[in-house]
Image (tube, grey):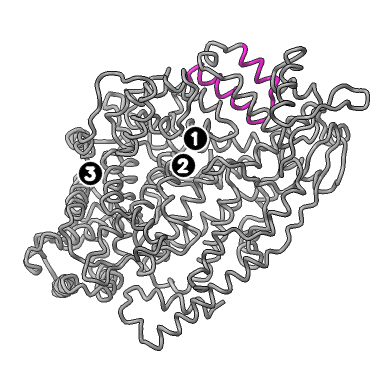
Amino acid sequence: MASYDYDDSRAGYEESSATQRGSQTPSSGQDLGYDPNYVPDSVKSFVVHLYRHIREKNVYEIHQMYETSFQTLSERLFKDTPWPSVDAVAPCVDNDHVFCLLYREMWFRHLYARLTPTLKQRIDSWDNYISLFQVVLHGVVNMQLPNQWLWDMVDEFVYQFQSFCQYRAKMKNKTDQEIALLKQFDQAWNVYGVLNFLQALVEKSMIIQILEREKEGLEQFTSLDGYDYNGGSNVLKVLGYFSMVGLLRVHCLLGDYHTGLKRLLPIDISQQGVYYTVIGCHITTIYHYGFANLMLRRYTDAIREFNKILLYIHRAKNYHHKSPQFEQILKKNEQMYALLAICLSLCPQMKLVDEVTVNAQLREKYGEKMIRMQRYDDEAFAIYDELFSYACPKFITPSAPSFEEPLVNYNQDAYRLQLKLFLYEVKQQQLLSGVRTFLKVYSTISLGKLASYMEVDEPTLRTILMTYKHKTHAVDSDGKIISNADVDFYIDDDMIFVVDSKSAKKYGDYFLRQIVKFEGLMNSLDAVKLGGFTNNPDGVKLKGFVNNLDK
Amino acid sequence: MGRERDAVVPVPKQAPPQQQVSQMVEQLLAVNPYNPEILSELENYVNEQVSSQTYSLDANLCLLRLYQFEPERMSTQIVARILVKALMAMPAPDFSLCLFLIPERVQMDEQFKTLIVLSHYLETGRFRQFWDEAAKSCHIVEAVLGFEQAIQAYAIHVLSLLYQKVPRSVLAEAINIEGLSLDKFLEHQVANSGWLLEKSHGKGQLIVLPRSEFNHPTLKKNAADAIPVEHVTRIFPILG
């Protein structure tokens, strides 16, 4: 077992919010200095303006206040206390029900990010999400909110669920009062509730049908970045869209990789969709997609997407330098390099990896470890263990504890199981790197000769070669056999023939990509002429434009 | 919360005829995949898969998920059946997918340990050990219809990835058929699946397996140069 602390309080582990979570661990903000009813003028002005912009559907201003002002105020006034209570600010915003739900959502998010929530607060936050989602599901909201905010809601909802499961699983030092509360509010963060709300958002929003219709040119969603320019609301649609990513993540946390990928299927990740407009969502999507594929042994799919996103992060890093998500971006960046190192050690497909940036970084970070991972000894396993433990999602046990004495902690059970099964897979593949080394230097070799080089008998060699073929040929989501093999060979009776597989350069794809890129560039130029930036809240087109010039 | 929503789905009390079970379960899954009330339907469906040689990974994963959420409702007998069906789905990774959802302490159970060993032999191409072990634990695997044939199909799949021509003895060991039965089996494959028989230089029979891009890597090259239609569609709007 790796020495990594798998504890929930480990700083900033999961994406979601700004700063390091709970690392300061003061006593839940109930310090002597905190008066929940005191509303400083700057806060009053903040909520009044935010409320007005929301009513006026000024997405650009909402986005600015949400991304910048909220962070600045938190940093200045609420570094280690919660924001003023919702009851204290409600009079400033006509006691608007929906605004108060949104305010509380941010209130709890801030609390989770900077302090340690009490059990009561966890339960209250659950109730707030339920009220908020129910309002959205019943279609009574008429707001237009920035994608970033909507993503943060889904992301935080899943994070708080995960955090609750971790918290609940540490039964050993629970007080009687906490246990009583857990029993009383057993529906709070219940796994069925969490899954059903995400699923309800997906279904009620009709997002799957919208994406289908868009493919046929009957509807616009992706091309408008999910916004509605005809006076409608984007909230349900976009929450439904992000909930598919939320479901992918929840299923990965539960170890159900097949179902997770299935929930993501309506989003075509080979295209730049709405998930692309929020970098946190983009990263969460690809991280979990890649991880699930790694566990399904579809290594090339994982390598391809990790490569793409690591390249993207490398280029976009400076742009997000000041973003509150910056630390999370860097953290996930490092984890994905670790996962890429694992994938490439099990499936050495270097040609899929960008040479200049990704491979150079990879060599710098894990070059030496990757050489040791090729060996067949305990040290190699220890490295697989270490990288997996560092980079895997925070697996959870979704079931409620048995409240019978003695109370035991079970917060590591799920992680241990996934680790064990992963290492089992590594063990099954441990002889393959030896075979690779030999096959790369021969064009023909007899089984007998190779067997003696590898110091095994001939029947054993045949099983090793079968293992190689089995492990390098994955089954894709349609049941088709896909080759991940780095060496092509076959056996005729008792001779092995290795086929040199120099992949021809694909010019067709290159031209296609350049055509698309050029077209995008021309569109951006047109937009400049028409002054088309102003109605685009995320400045996405602008970003695309800059990226295009970049390349 | 979720439970209230679930009440919308009516669950028939009486067992319907077999063919309808699969249809009904697929429908229940489509309506709400996170419904704790469909547990017994899913269990019945596992039994139906066992007797009718059908298979639904999605339904079985859904059931394992419900067990994961409410461990006290778990039936180890049903879990064992799901795992045997998953073995039969090789080369797909279904067996691991199921294990990911089964708590470690449950996996300690003797029958699961046996199944994990069987899976290990299949994953690492050790067919002789597999058949020996399977013979010892026939009470687990023989309860499931079509087990032997499914594993033989997997063995032939792996052999076809590796061999252009495979010695008769290697094939015999992998599919656990010998002598006259093997002759008959080969005859059938020659007639139906494009297999050919050859004499090797004095050592016995060689079986020529059908060509594929996996055992004839040169076949792959041509496909690599082509551009998939989906990629071309990206520029349709521009061309238009």
Label 1 residue SS: helix
Q: Residue at x 84, y 23 (%)?
A: B205
> Position of A489 compared to B31: left or right?
right
Report x, y in % for residue B143.
Answer: 51, 13
Q: Is residue A210 above or below residue A448?
A: below
Label 3 – label 1 distance at C-alpha: 33 Å
Report x, y in % for residue A531.
Answer: 36, 86
Q: Chain ID for label 1?
A: B
Q: Which residues are magenta?
A: B109-135
Residue type pointed to by label 1: Leu
Q: Residues within 10 Å of mark 2 (few under 14, many from 20)?
A: many
Label 3 – label 2 distance at C-alpha: 30 Å
Between B215 and A137, the one nearer to me in the picture:
B215
| Quarter location, residue A64 | bottom left
Would you name the residue on which mark 1 appears?
B97
Q: Is residue A426 visible?
A: yes
Q: Does the segment drawn in magenta span residue B128?
A: yes
In the rendered image, the quadrant that contains the C terminus of chain A is bottom right
Between A85 and B238, the one nearer to me in the picture:
B238
Residue type pointed to by label 2: Tyr
Would you name the residue on which mark 2 appears?
A257
Report x, y in % for residue B135.
Answer: 62, 12
Would you name the residue on which mark 3 appears?
A119
Q: Residues within 10 Å of mark 3 (few under 14, many from 20)?
A: some
Between B132 and A157, the one nearer to me in the picture:
B132
